[in-house]
Image: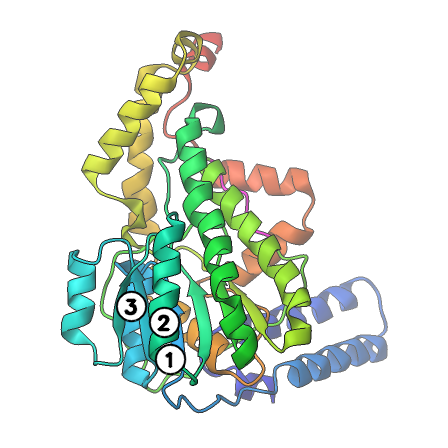
Amino acid sequence: MLLYKSRSPGQLRSQVVCLAGLWGGACLLGLSLLCSLFLLSASCFLLYVSSSDQDLLPVDQKAVLVTGTDSGFGHALAKHLDKLGFTVFAGVLDKEGPGAEELRKNCSERLLVLQMDVTKPEQIKDAHSKVTEKIQDKGLWAVVNNAGVLHFPIDAELIPMTFYRKCMAVNFFGTVEVTKAFLPLLRKSKGRLVNISSMGESLYKPGRVELEGRKSTQILCGDQCCMVPFQMLSAYNSTKAAITMFSSILRQELAKWGVKVVTIQPGGFRTNIIGSQDSWDKMEKEILDHCSKEIQEDYGQDYIRTQKLMLPAMRDKSNLDLSPVLRDIQHAISARNPSSFYFPGRMTYPLICFAAYSPTNLLDHILKKYFRPVHVPRALRTAH
């Protein structure tokens, strides 16, 4: 029955494979065949029961607010939800930008573009007033906190404090501020709060997304889940870890109000969050300007400049198909009983499980091999 339910791509199939591996491991540990079969059967039954409620609630033009819809996940999600019949409030950083203009041009009259820089409380307050005015007694069903920024990938010691503060201001404090502003409306509707976190990196370039005829998938996971500590992304990953913990606490606190809180932790998807060549050059200059003379001598300017080579590599290795992310967000919004965590992306769930339960030294060794630097700091080259 589990294999039948996991026909569509998603994390349920990964869980079935993990169960098979668990059973095989139990056999290798010397447990009797009867005990191993009992373990497998009990695990399958619990997984089947926990994932049995796949029914989606009717759309009925439910109102959903999505932040960061200028491009990437948010842009594609706003279009997708509008096509499904939702009333969409699309928060954008630039109301006159190309992303906002494309939404107005290609979506229905149900979609309303809102100027909403999540770092500016006055814009959040103005967006709240416009949402309240339009929905009136219908209520706001869901908020999707998607807005986020990425910094130049480089050693934590070299990242300027301005990068740390900007990442925290947008990725974490922006999420918290939007959540606090719209929670009264969610409590009234007993709706959904969906926060986009990350397993470590989420990089995507907008592309065509096809979802017709594909089923939504979900997974259930405990709070042990953690993001993979990828090197060179300390500021970004730290903010996403904060979002995950914030969401886990809210999930417990808002349960008594009937509000369900969901965390989406995508794998490697290519979005324009990675920025352009001009933005890379600007960040590189800022890093060089903020480095002390001692740090520049130890690392070397050539080391800093070659880190830009990571950006195209990260982009090229990322998944071009956004549909797993959109499908899981849709399920989080529409399912009668959504999962607390979703992990869209190839190998995302197994990798997060491995990071959560493997010995630290083993994890560090594997990540060191995976993230082998393209260049070595000057002081280390001299020492060798």
Q: Residue at x 33, y 52 (%)?
A: 117
Q: Residue under label 2, please give it.
A: 131
Q: Residue under label 3, please give it.
A: 76
Give the distance between the C-alpha atoms of the residues marked 3 and 2, in whole angstroms.
Answer: 21 Å
Q: Amino acid at mark 1?
A: Ile
Label 2 crowd (10 A; few <14 / some 14-19 / many >=20): many
- Which sits in the foreground, 246 or 112? 112
Q: Is residue 374 above or below residue 245?
A: above
Dots 1, 2 in contact, CB < 8 A: yes
- Which sits in the foreground, 34 or 323? 323
Q: Is residue 317 visible?
A: yes
Q: Residue at x 41, y 21 (%)?
A: 376
Q: Residue at x 49, y 37 (%)?
A: 234
Q: Is residue 110 above or below residue 204?
A: below
Would residue 230 be counted in the magenta stretch? yes
Q: Which residues are magenta?
A: 226-231
Residue 203 percent across, percent down from the top left? 35, 52
Residue 141 percent across, percent down from the top left? 46, 78
Q: Quadrant of residue 64?
A: bottom left
Q: Quadrant of residue 133?
A: bottom left
Helix, strand or loop: magenta stretch: loop
Q: Residue under label 1, please give it.
A: 135
Q: In screen coordinates, is 348 left or right of 286?
A: right
Q: Amino acid at mark 2?
A: Val
Label 3 crowd (10 A; few <14 / some 14-19 / many >=20): many
Give the distance between the C-alpha atoms of the residues marked 3 and 1, in whole angstroms.
Answer: 23 Å
- Depth check, mark 3 against mark 2: the one in front is 2
Quarter of the figure with the N terminus: bottom right
- Depth check, mark 3 against mark 1: the one in front is 1
- Which sits in the foreground, 199 or 42? 199
At mark 2, the secondary structure is helix
